[in-house]
Image (spheres, rainbow, N blue to C red):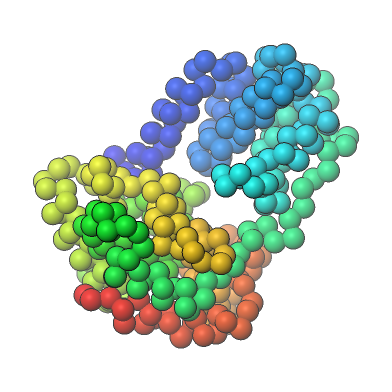
Amino acid sequence: MKGREEHKYKSESKMRALLRDKPQYFTGYYNGLFNSCEYLTAQNYTMTAVRFMNYLKENGFIESIEDCNGAMTIDNVNSYLSCLRGRDGGYSSDSAKATTYTALKSFADYLLSRKMISELPFDCGIKRVSVKDPLKQVAMTAAELKKVVERINDNSIGTKRANARREAWKERNLAIFTLLMVTGIRVTALTELNMEDIFWDQKIIRVTDKRRNTYECELDDDSMDILRNWVIKRAELLNKRDCNALFISNRRTRITDKSVRDLVKAYTADFEKHITPHKFRSTFATLLYDQTGDIAYVQQLMNHSRPDTTQRYIVRKPINAEAAKYVNSLLLSLIHI
């Protein structure tokens, strides 16, 4: 099974199991989204709807989550948006609230179309969440990029016991960070890569984007060597087990998006800025634009359909001129190939 299809199948199975004991309208909403948009969007929007309804019931706004008409009020939606919190316990960013707003509006549109509510509160009193910087992108500096690579090589970010376990996965971690840095690949596309997506002779990897289209990323010789080292280590770790995924977990199955996010967090926990896999994408776009000044070229390599989307990723700060000097040699000057 292809990486994307495998990921999609597992996600859909989990969602349907989760919705099994929920009111039927959740399943109807999910089915409509699943057939019309990216499956991860369908999953995230549906889970937002479930969390919203549970919040209302737990806080006494409604007696039952069956009561959709009583749920979709201006006060209820505003109350939920105002108290959203992130995983760290702090209040959610405007970007997260804007995403929640969009998801709840989609949910309300569905309920209205099924005549389960009588009016759309978003048309009469709920202020749209505005985001000055929707992606909140902060490109990484040269020093930060260098520090990540050094930490992978030195295996020096945790206890001796944790580092001993991590040592066996050094080649994988280096390959993951290499692709994040030199291709700007999205984390889901990264975890969905399969062995047959590497074309060694052409020095190309084939990527499936969130719109289910495929495109190719050309790699330099050194990046290909990093991948080759990982593939050799991967075969050793699998020990003849059957797995088609390029990147595997310690369970010898396809690595998950969460595992990659946790990996990035582990190597960047003490950085002043919050680093996620997507920050590498922003850094890639910024460095590339600093080097070329060609927004159309960056748009092509980022696989964006619109240039204004690409522009949102580019962080204009002088520090990135320094970082651009590293983009082709930073990793490899620190890596023992």
Q: Is residue 327 visible?
A: yes
**Which residue corresponds to the image point at 81% horizontal and 27% vertical from the top-left?**
73
Where in the figure is residue 12, as x and y percent of width and height? 44, 31
Quarter location, residue 66: top right
Counting from the top left corner in percent of width and height, residue 264 is at 43, 58
- Residue 202 pos. (x, y %): 27, 70
Q: Decide: is 153 above or below 25.
A: below
Q: Nearer the viewer, residue 34 or 52?
A: 52
Q: Residue furthest right?
A: 124
Residue 102 x/y as whole percent: 70, 41
Is 168 placed above or below 129 here? below
Q: Can residue 218 be seen from the camera position used here?
A: no
Residue in the picture at 13% in, 54% down: 236
93 lies left or right of 43:
right
Q: Nearer the viewer, residue 163 or 254?
A: 163
Quarter occupied by residue 74: top right
Q: Nearer the viewer, residue 17 or 3?
A: 17
Quadrant of the drawing holding the C terminus: bottom left
> Which residue is at a point 51% across and 85% down the rendered structure image?
322
Q: Residue at x 43, y 29 (%)?
A: 14
> Looking at the rendering, in which quadrant would you find the N terminus?
top left
Q: How many marks?
A: 0
Left or right side of 111 for 203: left
